[in-house]
Image (tube, rainbow, N blue to C red):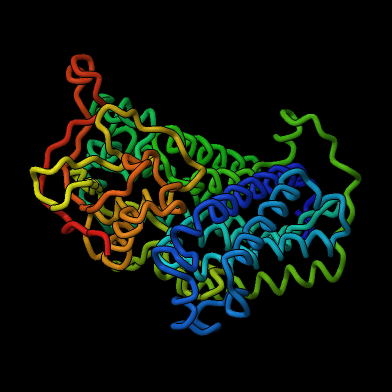
Amino acid sequence: MEWFGESGYWLSRWMFQRGLGLVYLVAFLVAANQFRALIGSRGLTPIPRYLEQRSWRQSPSIFHIYYSDRFFALVAWCGAVLAGAAMFGIGDLLPLWASMAMWALLWILYLSIVNVGQAWYGFGWESLLLEVGFLAIFIGAGPAEPPVLVLFLLRWVLFRLEFGAGMIKMHGDHCWRDFTCLYYHHETQPMPNALSWHFHHLPKPLHRLEVAGNHFAQLVVPFFLFAPQPVASLAAVIIVVTQTWLVVSGNFAWLNILTIVLALSVIDGAWWSKVIPLNAPVAEPVPKWHAIAAIALTALVIALSFRPARNLFSRQQLMNYSFDKLHLVNTYGAFGRVTRTRYEVILEGTEADQPTDDAEWREYDFKGKPGDPYRRPRQFAPYHLRLDWLMWFAAISPRYAQTWLPRLARKLVENDPATLKLLRHNPFAETPPRWVRARMYVYRFTTRAERERTGAWWHREFVSDYMAPVGRG
């Protein structure tokens, strides 16, 4: 490799930028479609109230300058348009400085959203998108060679993402060490998809093999990302395969897709040329000012990497944590502990004058989270159903929902249109309910025999009341 540019990675950059543009597009569409009910001026955790309690330094965002729901929508839709342009390769048609400005604007807009998103944006894939998006500003465009330093910084992100996920399992639940976590995970994961029921019923030896494959992909393979080609490409392909397995077995927003996009940047351009009918343009050397920018970026990332790197080997390893408010270098990891039993919070409403158990209660049905036992789980990822995910956390502990669940109940009592758009079905379309309550159930996948006999995907049993009825006024 040359020190500043690598012409053999033009197609690798081509794939990476278009994949990243797609992920940005999904993220901005999620923001545009869901913000009014969640964080809008009349949302469950309003941005204006949050901004009153936070300074610019605590949460850098353009919304400190001005906020209104219309302005937020403008930001989100402008981000979606820019992301679409990036996905279709408009950046390659621009001068290098203009392409960098486009990627920088995408990063600024999404950073501004994440830093006011509160609990709804507290997921690891938000920080991952921002970290990768910041590096994408410097990867170049058009015929200019991608700076080799930036390519290695992308590998450093992928290494921390995979190795961090592996280490947090080693530090966490013993079932990862005795290879039994997948006995439970497909059933208890935040949002199962259409195939999760089938994955759950795989023979236990295959579940143990899944865990072994996970450990190999996350604890061994990442080190080979820094090896010479073709070893690095082979390591990236293994990561792509394992991440695709996660895509087809569950709904994890754009985490797996973005991990795949990162891995695509590692694969040698010579491999891509065999499957993509594109001819790389005559390579141009990296401009001097661009090379200097890449060196400065590398120095910054090295300086900010100390705490994330140390965290990888800490017994108190932090999961999905940002050490800086700009989310430039983060720590990652998921499912250090696996729940054995699936609990679900079910919201119900009634038109009765008094909220007694004798009243007729009707359930609200969510788009993604389990509810009706006869409704098959669906595939939503890479789209992110934020309310559905927070309801999973609410079932783990009421502390995750104490700031917004009572407000959600009040919105349902009012038949609030923005809130109802987040749900699959409103059982009170004509007349709002007088009362809304929350109850806790334990869910499990039906057995093959139960599924054949009843047609149900889930079996559930009532556990207890979760939230007292909330009435009008």
Residue at the (49%, 50%) spot, across then down? 222
Give the x, y percent position of residue 420: 41, 48
Instruction: Pick the residue in front: 432 or 84.
Output: 432
Work out whether residue 327 can be spotted.
Answer: yes
User: Percent x, y for residue 430?
Assistant: 36, 41
Foreground pick, 153 / 435: 435
Query: Which residue is farthest top?
Result: 453
The image quadrant of residue 197 is top left
Q: Position of residue 70 (x, y in %)?
A: 62, 64
Point out residue 267 in the picture as x, y percentages from the top left corner.
Answer: 65, 42
Please tell me whether residue 230 is drawn above or below residue 455 in the rendered image: below
Tell me how many marks there are.
Answer: 0
Residue 179 visible in rendering: no
The quarter in which the C terminus is drawn is bottom left
Of 214 and 73, which appears nearest the observer?
A: 73
Residue beneath the point at 63% across and 49% down: 25
Is residue 202 toward the left or the right of residue 107 in the image? Answer: left
Which of 130/64 is in front? 64
Question: Residue drawn 54% across and 68% down?
Answer: 329
The answer to whether residue 414 is left or right of residue 298 is left
